[in-house]
Image: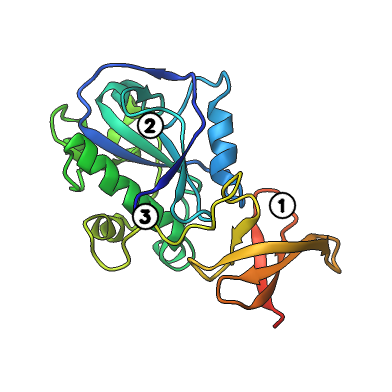
Amino acid sequence: MALVRHWYPSPNYSSGGSNRLLVIHTTEGFTGSNGMYDCAIYFQGNVGASSNVCIDNFHPGHICEGVSRSHNAWTQCNYNSQTAASVEQCAYASWSRSTWLNDKMPLLENVAAWLAEESAYFGIPLTELSSSQSQDGYSKGVTYHSRLGSAGCGHSDPGSGYPLDVVLDMARGGSGGGGGTPPPQGPVAGEDYVIIPGKPGNWLKLTQEFMAADGSKAQMGIGTDGCVYRITKAFSADAGWRGPNKLA
């Protein structure tokens, strides 16, 4: 199933280059339930940076696109012109492999689907590149931001725990692949739906908002499994939803 791409055009881009790399990043923030939208809006500002797409853990089958395939996003410094496409995952480089695989599968599935689409479009193989291959100027494949070294901004993302082997297997059509189950379409896709925490692919249609006993925001809704759930907004604006508590 093709990803649904929500267009949030960024003015921060350039043109030309060799288009040989697909580069994976983490945002080091924007991990709340509207993360990919917040990230895309940030890149619309005069910030001197951008990414082709932003992906979070809360919108299976949906991503935000800020720089088109015909342009180069500004997020790999001297390697911008060699990057066919880059993805900002709303995530942290400090996450462990266990965190990625147990708690962030909707995000990984979307990244796998994105890699498959970009590989098909650009003719870039779904092959993991080493640091030396990433920097050699001619090898084609998938790499980390960190593997571009100091000339690539000298960053450490997406971190040593990132399960690229699993993501590439899904991108090649292995078990667990695909873009997940998207919420029903509406005027603003995803506005009235959130992913049920701990239940990848199971969406909650929000029906009622109220204050929880501890003063935090809570929502009730009907899950795609037909059950009634309550979820609670953590105090940190970037923390996303807690729960769920199954009510019926």
Task: Identify the residue shown where x is 45% and y is 68%.
Answer: 102
Compared to residue 206, the image places residue 91 above or below, namely above
Work out which residue is located at the far bottom of the displayed protein and give it: 248
- Cα separation, mark 3 vs mark 2, equals 18 Å
Q: Which residue is mark 3?
A: 162
Q: Which residue is mark 1?
A: 236
Amino acid type, callout 3: Tyr
Asked if one can make out residue 142 in the rendered structure from this viewpoint, the answer is no
- Answer with left or right where residue 21 lies relative to residue 209: left
Residue 112 x %, y %? 32, 53
- Cα separation, mark 1 vs mark 3, equals 24 Å
Q: First in sequence, mark 2 or 1: give its number.
A: 2
Here the colouring is rainbow
- How busy is the neighbourhood of tag 1: few (under 14 within 10 Å), some, or many (20 plus)? few
Work out which residue is located at the far left of the displayed protein and give it: 138
Q: First in sequence, mark 1 or 3: give its number.
A: 3
Q: Secondary structure at mark 1?
A: loop
Q: Which residue is mark 2?
A: 154
- Answer with left or right where residue 66 lies relative to residue 243: left
**How many dots with numbers?**
3
- Answer with left or right where residue 8 lies relative to residue 236: left
Depth order, front residue of 186/210: 186
Task: Identify the residue shown where x is 27% and y is 31%.
Answer: 84
Which corner quadrant of the image does residue 134 belong to?
Answer: top left
- Answer with left or right where residue 156 lies relative to residue 124: right
Q: Which quadrant of the figure contains the N terminus? A: bottom left
- Cα separation, mark 2 vs mark 1, equals 29 Å
Which corner quadrant of the image does residue 78 belong to?
Answer: top left
